[in-house]
Amino acid sequence: MDTATTLPDLDIEPTAGRRSAGTDASVTTLVRPVEHPLGHLGLLESLAIFIIREVAAESERPVLLFSGGKDSAVLLHLAAKAFKPGGIPFPVLHVDTGHNFPEVLAFRDAQVEAEGARLIVAKVQDSIDNGRVADPGPGGSRNRLQTTTLLDAIAANGFDAAFGGARRDEDKARAKERVLSFRDAFGQWDPKRQRPELWQLYQGTVRAGEHLRVFPLSDWTELDIWQYIRREQIELPSIYFAHEREIVHRDGMLLALSEWVSAQPGEEVRRETVRFRTVGDATCTGAVISSAATAEEIIRETSVTHISERGGTRADDRFSESAMEDRKREGYF
């Protein structure tokens, strides 16, 4: 792949260190980038749209992975923008754990319908029923089981590229992953066998049975995501904004009570004003105490936080220091 992205112009000007004529002249130069006319968010958007278009053009059967969270909502918005006035030329795939927040499922259906895209739902429950994975039980997390369901869906549909909303600032395993992440015939990722992406040049050729994971939001931060949501007025599930909910404090996290999460002996049920920074399996996704009810308030809140949304609110990332990388090697998102 090639890109038309240009480097910003450089403004070179002498400093005040120039001496008068006839003496030893000592001139240093100050090199400062001139602000790009697109602005910071415009550049991120432009590169993401470029990546989406290029991969869609080179792949035979791409698909967009959609969880109903803020990052996949931004990704869906960018895909729609990339191909307007036409529609999104590839389907949207949701891997359904069966333990989803109802607000997220309602949002998923509404957004996909609004964009006129085709929705494919791959269910973890089907993988359990077919004996592909073991049932963790009524209160057990199904988050890790998604890997098998995802790989089966990719193989069944013959997808050779899957767009995802992962960002490098979320986790150190994602920080070392390329924009185009290559998966072998078993869907596995080897961080030592990644292709170089110098000067935003991407090479997306894969052999039969292999596929790409494509991350157009790799260089975005959580703050960038929220600023872009505010700028573009992107809709999100209501659980991202402050609301009252019954929660229990468990293992350093605030878990919302639901049909899959109930208070254990010794746990106190409290009603708090909370919001969610990330969306996942309800059994392992924690809330945060917050009164931020608008994108503007969340931007102010996010600008002073020092913990990523996954590091602070996802139990599945706490099993070990390499929990995310271990799952990615197996084929996780």
Image (spheres, grey):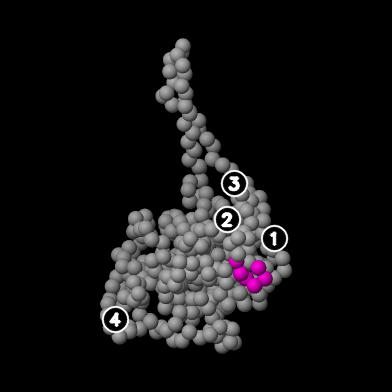
Q: Quadrant of residue 271?
A: bottom left
Q: CA distance from mark 3 to mark 4?
A: 54 Å
Name the residue at 61% across, 49% down.
198
Q: Looking at the magenta stretch, what is its main secondary structure? A: loop
Helix, strand, or loop for circle 2? helix
Helix, strand, or loop for circle 3? loop
The tag earlier along the polypeptide, 1 or 4, is 1
Residue 174 x/y as whole percent: 51, 61
Name the residue at 45% across, 66% down.
321
Residue 131 x/y as whole percent: 58, 87
**Residue 127 appears anywhere in the view:** yes
Which mark's residue is nearer the viewer, 1 or 2?
1
**Residue type beneath disc 2:** Ile
Seen in the picture, residue 140 relative to 237 is either above or below; the reply is below
Q: Which residue is mark 4?
A: 267
The tag earlier along the polypeptide, 3 or 4, is 3
Q: Which residue is mark 1?
A: 205
Name the residue at 30% across, 73% down.
244
Whether residues under marks 2 and 3 lie with C-beta atoms below 8 angstroms apart, the answer is no
Q: Which residue is mark 3?
A: 5
Q: CA distance from mark 1 to mark 3?
A: 22 Å
Q: Nearer the viewer, residue 134 or 2?
A: 134
**Residue type beneath disc 4:** Glu
Residue 265 x/y as whole percent: 30, 85
Other residues around mark 4 within 10 Å, as few (<14) / some (14–19) / many (≥20):
few
Seen in the picture, residue 254 relative to 137 is either above or below; the reply is above
Which mark's residue is nearer the viewer, 1 or 4?
4
